[in-house]
Image: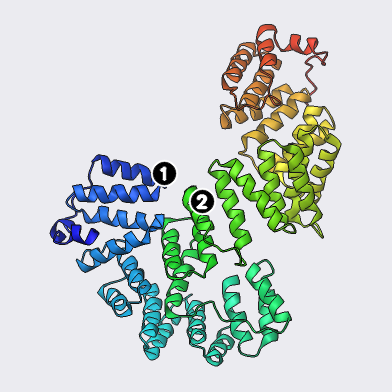
Amino acid sequence: MIKNILTGVLVAMLSGAAFAQSGAYLAASQSKARNDFLVAAEYYFQAAQKEEFNVRLLGRALESFVLAGNLDRAFELADVLQTNGAAIGNSRLVAFVGQVKDENFTAAMDVLNSGTVSTPDLDMFLRAWGHLALGDQDAAFEKFEAVSQIENLAPVASLHKILAHAQAGDFDKAVIEYDASGPFGGSRNGMTYAQVLSNSDRMEDALVMAKRFPNDPALSAAVEAMTKEQKLDFDTVVSPTEGIAEILFTVAQSQEEVSEAGLIYGRLATALVGANAQAHLLVAQNLRDFRAYGLAQNSFKNIAAEDPYHFRAQLGLIDATWRDGKTTAATELARALVDAYPDQQEAHRQLGNLLRDQEDYRGAEKSYRRAIKLIETPAASDWSLYYARAITFERRGKWRKAERDFRAALELQPDQYRVLNYLGYSLVERGEKLDEALSMIERAVAQAPDAGYIADSLGWALFKLGQYERALDPMEKAVSLMATDPVVNDHLGDVYWAVGRKPEAEFQWLRTLSFITEDTDLRDIDPERVKSKLDLGLDAVLKNEGASPLKAADEN
């Protein structure tokens, strides 16, 4: 369809006309801002038609199709742009990958010869694998050797030489290259080395390599197999096409922050290889971070149940579903994951988090208890489990159990500001161990000085200690950081009242009432009590409650 529409309009495409201010263009821009990539792509394409096929808009449509995962449309559009000499942005890279996917390697090399596909360095890797696909090993290894001379790229070039030898079945040359260069990179490369060593009758070295990554499920399975003296199948890269996918995945993985470039390279890698679960995971995680939750869920589902990375994918699927506002569906997925993986701590933790979010504190506590039981030796990273269970106890009124878990979390992470703040604030609210509570909150403030809820805790602790003047600064800072929070505004009102600024106190209480909605947790703020303070004043309310009257402490 696209070819028929665009043929013959090259002159208009190359004109670089100004972007349309049409409804289609505006809709495309708005959709792109929401990371609704597929809708954006369709609107960009419509806008391009209205602009006599503006090449820049077509480039945006193409990239949006890639981001959305509609690669067939992207490949077709890239081919048209390439054929008409109108390559722009990533269109030449997409055209190259489209030809590789169709195993048209001569055409793919023609794309490379027409101009830079990505960067000169990456293009050398693509050329090397392209030469291998065409059966020209000498030319391929010349390119690998050339890229190995570039600063910082020698380890990557060596890895790809190992992959190139291994995919051809020449493990002797692969292991010679390994011995000359040594290991490089993370767990996926570790799997490459373990497989090569295993196939070179160096099982002990392969086992040592695999054990370097105890948290990687695929390498854990490899360790188990090699312990039984089973040689590993070499399946990291089994063809030049997968070699090209591997370098695209490497580029996607190397991005320091979530970016469209990383997602584009990840999408193109998954287009060429269905077995690389890590590429699908990377794409899904990027989409989740872009808040494109529907697309993320689809990508997490690409990883089969028998794949070693299936458990990680299911955790990601649950998280994306939850963030998408589908709490019930996410909870059902989490329960299924617990049933399928009863010995996986993260499954119980995830279910606990979902139940706690729904205020099912009894159910959440059970899930956290099961997760904690799976801990053999508590590590610093386990603080969050004890912290989460402490919250469920606190919400259910089981304070002594809650305090025990809060303190257990602090034993593992003594400066964890969330725990310090929660425990300190809770002690303040209970009127217990106020000096210790204040010390905890001050430590929390030092760790997170711009957290409004912690500034509120500090101000409230000082208020409870009768240090009203000292409470002013942190409480006003808390309101500046959390301007519409009813609890924080109520606290500031009390502080103003205590220092004699009664009109300002009444104003803050009025603000408090305006911020209470149907979503406000009324265990944290009582609107009737706020109204009473407006009618009678704080002193009278405290007297009616049988509480101690306001009394300033010596703050010197």
Q: What residue type is labelled 2?
A: Asp
119 in relation to 362, above or below: below
Q: How far apart are marks 1 and 2 (CA)?
A: 12 Å
Residue 490 placement, left or right of 514: right
Residue sitting at x 76%, y 52%: 371
32 in relation to 275, above or below: above
Q: Quadrant of residue 120?
A: bottom left
**Can residue 533 be seen from the camera position used here?**
yes
Between discs 1 and 2, the one toward the N terminus = 1
Residue sitting at x 55%, y 62%: 303
Q: Where is residue 544 in the image (x, y as percent from the top left)?
A: 79, 9
Q: What residue type is labelled 1?
A: Arg
Quadrant housing the C terminus = top right
Residue at the disc numbered 2 = 289
8 in relation to 22, above or below: below
Q: Where is residue 54 in the image (x, y as percent from the top left)?
A: 21, 53
Quadrant housing the N terminus = bottom left
Towards the viewer: 438 or 263 = 263
Name the mark on residue 34: 1
Residue sitting at x 78%, y 30%: 428
Callout 1: SS: loop
How are the residues colored? rainbow
Callout 2: SS: helix
Q: Quadrant of residue 172?
A: bottom right
Residue 412 placement, left or right of 259: right
Q: Position of residue 112 (x, y in %)?
A: 30, 75
Q: Where is residue 162 in the image (x, y as percent from the top left)?
A: 52, 84
